[in-house]
Amino acid sequence: MAGASGWTDLRARLAATGYVASDALAMALHLALTLGRPLLLEGAAGVGKTELAKTLAGMLGARLIRLQCYEGLDAGHAIYEWNYQRQLLAIRAGGDADETRVFSQEFLLTRPLLEAIRQPEPPVLLIDEIDRADEEFEAYLLEILSDFQVSIPELGTISATSRPHVILTANGARDLSDALRRRCLYAWIDYPDRATEAAILAARGPGVAEKLAGQIVGFVQALRREALEKKPGVAEMLDFAAALAGLGVNDLTDDPAALHATMVCLLKTEADSAAITPEVVQRLAGRAA
């Protein structure tokens, strides 16, 4: 993927797997791979950030190691911790002389971040929804993102056996620190435009007819412009298309009851379900037809 055409080649390879990337995203990913830098992806939920990491792993034939972030995540769950039960049993069996031996690789439990840098071949490390973790947790990441190493007081520094391809995702739950952002390349992923979403449906959808596919994309694009708590993402659009295909719907205006029933694929909160009434659904369907 080297050279000036590398990013276009990468975009084509992604498209061959069914992932339709914008020029900007393909370039950002190409540079991250070329420079060996982490890539931070921001955007609303459902626009394909996590899917890009999965697609990249499949495309490269690499192992995908995923760290799902959440409030309260700490180093013990993300990097490493000691197997205290085994340590205690070893000390009881061997006496006080074994207290230093128990702080060795034999008793170390690796978590996703340490596991990623110890792989013999470069994996894809997905640090998913980093903005859900506490600000303090970001400090644990900085050493890995900068130097691809982990410092363990009892063992010293463990450097990467192979350098993982790191992708971080964030949905805007909170602001990320400048220190984290400086260590990453960056790309914003927005909801796809109509042409891009049509290409995604053609590549990953259930093989719906061209007319219906156009209606589906137009309907979902219009629905996102409504005042919703949670706008439907690409995954929801694909679920919507699969539901319509399963019900044998050939035109969005044919069966209003069936169309409204499929809103369970697109609307994910009580407030949104109440706001998008059958009348609103018909209005949007009429415009998309």
Image: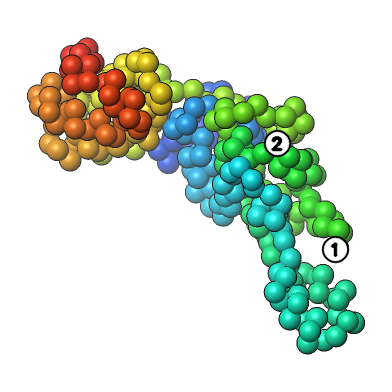
For the residues carrying marks 1 and 2, which lies nearer the camera in this image?
2
Nearest the eye: 220 or 88? 88
Give the residue at x 49% y 22%. Answer: 190
Q: Is residue 186 left or right of residue 259?
A: right
Give the residue at x 64% y 47%. Answer: 73
Residue 32 visible to an observer of this rendering: yes
From what the image shows, is residue 124 above or below residue 210? below
From what the image shows, is residue 111 above or below residue 285? below
On the image, numbered disc 2 is attached to which residue?
135
Answer with the quarter of the image where residue 273 lies. Answer: top left
Which label number is shown at residue 47?
none
Residue 5 visible to an observer of this rendering: no
Nearest the eye: 111 or 126? 111
**Mark 1: secondary structure:** loop
Question: Where residue 264 sits in the image (x, y, percent)?
Answer: 27, 34
Sequence-first disc among 1 and 2: 2
The quadrant of the picture occupied by the C terminus is top left
Give the residue at x 73% y 40%. Answer: 136
Give the residue at x 22% y 33%. Answer: 262
Name the kind of residue labelled 2 in the image: Glu
Could you classify mark 2 by the number of other residues whose Cα lies within 10 Å: few (under 14), some (14-19), or many (20 or more)? Answer: some
On the image, numbered disc 1 is attached to which residue?
155
Name the kind of residue labelled 1 in the image: Leu
Q: How many labels does the image show?
A: 2
